[in-house]
Image (spheres, rainbow, N blue to C red):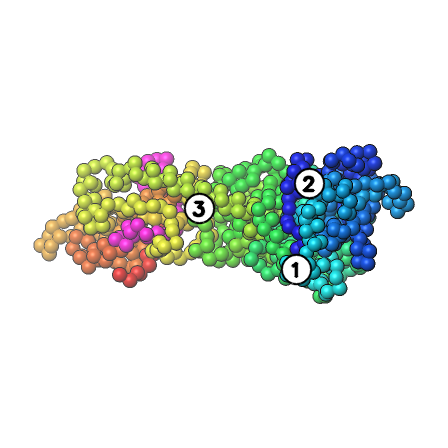
Amino acid sequence: NMGEPADPAEMEISTIEKVFPKGDIDVEDIDAKFQNADKLLAVMVSNINHDEDEEETHMILQDVPNVDTVLTKPPRRIFMKISNPWFAYLKSALKLKDVLYLKNISVFPRDNNITGHNYEMRLDDSPESKNAHVVVHSSEDRMLAQEGVKATYPDAKKYMDTASKKRKSLGFVNKNSKKKRKMDELYVYTPLAELEPRQDANIFSVIVNYNLIKITKTGDFHVVLSLTDPSLRGEVSSIVINCFSNTESRIPKPLRIGDLFRAHRVWPTTYGGKVLLTLPKNKGSFVCIDGRIGKSTEPYQSSTPNFSDVSARMVGHLREWAEKTDLPIFNPEVNNRPSSIAGLRPDSPGCEIICKVIGITHEKRGITWRYLVVWDGTDVEVEGDLVQIKKDECVMISPNRCPPRGAYFGVRVEVDILSKLEIRPGDWVHLRNLTLQTGDATSDKPNQTYGSAGDVRPLCETLMVCKRVDKKYQNRLAEEENDAESEAYQKEPNAAAEGGDEKRQQSQTMEDMTGKENRGNNQINAKDACVTIVDMEIPYYTPIHHMKLPYTPCPGKFQVRAKIRSVFPTDLKRWTRPFCDVCKSSENVKKKSSKGGSKYRCDACGRKGRVSFQYFFTLTLADATGDQEVIVAFDEATYFLNGLPPGDLEENDVTLKAIESRVSRLLEATSWGTFLLKSCDPPKEYEANEKAFYLYGTSLKILSS
């Protein structure tokens, strides 16, 4: 912890960037420009020796490598000698691969056969060195975009004059002493932007892409990783490393994009003007570490059991950087293509989408693919019958973790790919080469539309690309909630009862019992209570707005999460009707008087018709996207009301009171439910172009009062 952290910009040098400065000149310019020219030089320490007896540091400095412009010849080098007071101040901070930002440094003629340079630089107690400025930027600081250590002559002189005991109390430690150091301090990690061809390097990076393991012609295991770190801020955004091994256990197997990859003794080369890395089979080593914030910093895979200690500081900083950075995950050649499920069209070219896995279908014998049920907060806006995947066909996340908005879309992925990955419900994934397909007659899902992905990779959920999808979804919820609430307050309280004084009179009884129609917020909150149970959970929560669109299947089945805005008739005594079992209608059923009392008879069927009471009423369901009237009738209505038998409610007070208690609970502002609906052609009283929705397979929970 030598010196104080400093941004090179504090040296009042306007030509340096804040984190990764570039010098005004390079080593080759020193002969002509550097001496007494007030210019800034950025150089890297390529060789260093601390002479404790002479109290001097001797260094060979070179130009800072840059992968954006691969060096075609060895860099020029220059010698530098540091003596007191600078030696005492900087010796614990200077080490191999450090970058120095120098200004106002003394330059003297020198005949140096080692560097081939005619000059050398000095930092000493001479008058020329009293105006010098130095910033030491370690490789670790550069990798993590941290500030360097600033040094000026007054700083060095003050430190030199400090008593030895006082130095120790200030916490100054000579890192080059014989004191035992941790294993991770023995390795110097090179930022990816500074890799030099044909020079071994140690790297610590973030994985932004990886291929599945392949076997080479020579029988070696081979995998390719794409890596990045904070130093890659130019044209080159990632660097490829080829990993080879004789055994599968010594080949990297990343679990997800965003994980960390540390490798020792990698070999940089150039190909096509770009730097490529190779992890040698024999002397190279690696570890893979979970890239998610809050997880263990210990590796989940290593090429050897005797790996060196992992720097928790490096892991923590790289995780935080990856969370806040838009990593180069997408293929730059795939542009102007859909980036969400809502943008998919039958003629769309293969695209890349970030989404969350809601469920995964079970593997079946003889089937070479499985379906990922994915979600990205948007709706599928394509014509045709979307693939339907039932709960018993897949493993899915728990219902309380299922997002209530957005389509749950089935995407087919080859089993051969999924078998080499660890993807679980709830994981985020990067789908690649995603297109729309329609199953043929021989398919497991004939005539149904589904997605087909050429490849897929899991992602760390803490990455910015995942958070961006979730943020768009939250914005959608807020917008839909505001729109729906605004629209709801413009409607009449009893929209279902429009069109007659008789219906308005019928509504008064219900309003007296339960108050006004439930106009509460349509947003379902954690504190709200679910009041329904469904027999079969389809792993798709369809927004009500999407369910009503012309191209959704009819007949079709849907599962919605919604609140109950109103019921009709509001006079609960009219929830049952007398039906003729022969003509299946109540139109011709009349109440007849006889000596034994009143009875119902069908005028059309006469004595042949047997009349019985059946339920027939409607619920208005609402979510943040809109509302819909749903018919509840016959046996499904009896099931919905927990088996309460239908009858003449004008005469059966017991059943009527039981229904009233249930309806009161339904219309509470904090009540919501999961409902299974099926669409079909409308009854006669509906408009010809309007779908009808019936409730099925749904019952009320028996709640304690």
Q: Is residue 148 magenta?
A: no
Between 685 and 86, the one lying in front of the other is 86
Kind of residue at badge 2: Pro
Residue displayed at 77% across by 41% down:
128
Image quadrant of residue 170? bottom right
Magenta highlight range: 663-690
Which residue is identified by label 1? 166
Residue displayed at 55% across by 43% down:
438
Q: Which of marks 2 and 1 is nearer the N terminus?
A: 2
Where does the image place residue 431, in percent across and percent down from the top left?
59, 46
Query: In this rendering, which labeled residue sits more in front, label 2 or label 1?
Result: 1
Between 374 and 116, the one lying in front of the other is 116
Kind of residue at badge 1: Lys
Residue displayed at 55% across by 51% down:
462
Report how far apart the C-alphas of labels 2 and 3 lie in the structure.
47 Å
Image quadrant of residue 548? top left
Kind of residue at badge 3: Arg
Residue displayed at 37% across by 40% down:
482
Between 521 and 52, the one lying in front of the other is 52
Q: In which quarter of the image is the C terminus?
A: bottom left
Report how far apart the C-alphas of labels 3 and 1 lie in the structure.
64 Å
Where does the image place residue 554, in percent across and percent down from the top left?
42, 42
- Left or right placement of residue 574 versus residue 245 in this view: left
Q: Which of marks 3 and 1 is nearer the N terminus?
A: 1
Task: Check residue 612 in the rendering and tell me which mark sits there, or answer none.
Answer: none
